[in-house]
Image: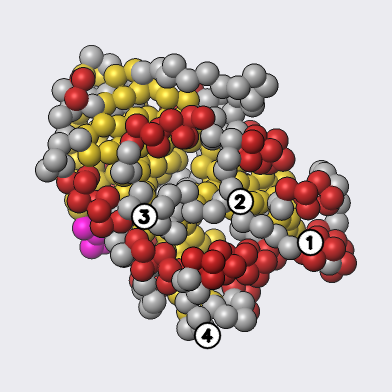
Amino acid sequence: MTTAPIALAGQELSADLDADALSRLVGLVDHDAANDPFPVIGMDAVVFVCGNATQTAHYFQSAWGMDLVAYSGPEVGNRDHTAYVLTSGSARFVIQGGVAPDSPLLDEHRRHGDGVVDLAMEVTDVDRCIVHARGQGAHILVEPHDRTDEFGTVRMAAIATYGHTRHTLVDRSRYTGPYLPGYVARRSSFVRRPGAPSRLFQALDHAVGNVELGRMNEWVHFYNKVMGFVNMAEFVGDDIATEYSALMSKVVANGNHRVKFPLNEPAVGKRKSQIDEYLEFYTEPGCQHLAQATGDILAAVDALRAEGVEFLSTPDSYYDDPVLRERIGHVRVPVAELKKRAILVDRDEDGYLLQIFTKPLGDRPTIFFELIERHGSLGFGKGNFKALFESIEREQAARGNL
């Protein structure tokens, strides 16, 4: 098979990432895109709805080291809501919050709390993608259309996925503005502390969706059929269970693994699983967590903890287990340094990875973040699932939700 060179998305180019650096960060594989029915370049943006977009945008700048690059709101003619566009490397977040009393975003937030409403993807041909998606039975939320301003034209459309989440499709090949028409370039007056790292994460590695019991395979089939995504991994049974709770998970990805969507559903257990808790408090399927790819997880964790970000704990016994030490072999830092920071480590046939998970970021026990540092591994930390889920269960018990 002949593979074409990896085409970088606009945000990846502006972040000074080359194809090799991106491949190391997020674990890319060769792919022949010539006959791809749904040609995805990469993630365009993760769009959040929050109760206080202004303060949330400040949090992502002050704690997570993101940069404010664009803004939309009443001052620029948008009477419905405010929106702050933040970047870290190739990752782009859009934080929206309702302003007008009748804004639909206020209804969205009342129903779900803070959360992700759109996993937008950059594509080479919006119309081609929509024709294929419609032919495969997808629900088209927004038909292909152009948005234009002095910086050029963006071609856009949107399709529905699980819950009220959507995938906006964006072709920005004819656009040079800061984000989209209706947004203006904006810089923040926030000043980082002396010595703070300039960038804590460089890319979005994957975005995890939680769906109802019995619906996971349906959504896997949706991504296979509608977007031409491939099945990348599957976790069932003892791989992904504890004494008290269980879940099932499958991972779909576009051809070169630039875009990866693990999909979880609850499984029958003695007590309420983390997926059950999410579905209860988010009130429907949605995006459970975002994994941020970093080149230095130790420095990132140290900086985030210094800003008050809380991570799940890991018992000392995890690091003292001789079976673990034998399985992981040599990694770039002593296990003692990982233990001090509660960073998990796993190895597969391709290499190893380091990862850690935050506690829920908002008031509801719904969305959280993962930091992941890959060293050849294309996996998701299968060897850490039990330790991770037991840690989540301890937090659930503290909330009275286990």
Residues marked 3 and 1 touching at CB (< 8 Å): no
Q: Amino acid at mark 3?
A: Met
Q: Which region is colored magenta?
A: 134-139
Magenta: main secondary structure: loop
Residue nearest the observer in this picture, 21 or 193: 193
Give the residue furthest to the top: 150
Instruction: Give the residue at x 34% y 32%.
Output: 54
Residue at mark 1 to residue at mark 2: CA–CA distance: 15 Å
Q: Which mark is residue 227?
A: 3
Residue 284 percent location from the top left of the image: 31, 65
Residue at mark 4 to residue at mark 2: CA–CA distance: 26 Å
Q: Amino acid at mark 1?
A: Asp
Instruction: Give the residue at x 48% y 83%.
Output: 268
Task: Classify mark 1: residues with Cα within 10 Å, few (<14), some (14-19) or many (20+).
Answer: few
For marks 1 and 2, the one nearer the N-term is: 2
Q: Amino acid at mark 4?
A: Lys
For marks 4 and 1, the one nearer the N-term is: 4
Instruction: Give the residue at x 83% y 52%.
Output: 335
For marks 3 and 1, the one nearer the N-term is: 3
Residue at mark 3 to residue at mark 1: CA–CA distance: 43 Å
Residue occupied by mark 2: 311
Residues marked 4 and 3 touching at CB (< 8 Å): no
Residue occupied by mark 1: 316
Residue at mark 4 to residue at mark 1: CA–CA distance: 26 Å
Q: Secondary structure at mark 3?
A: helix
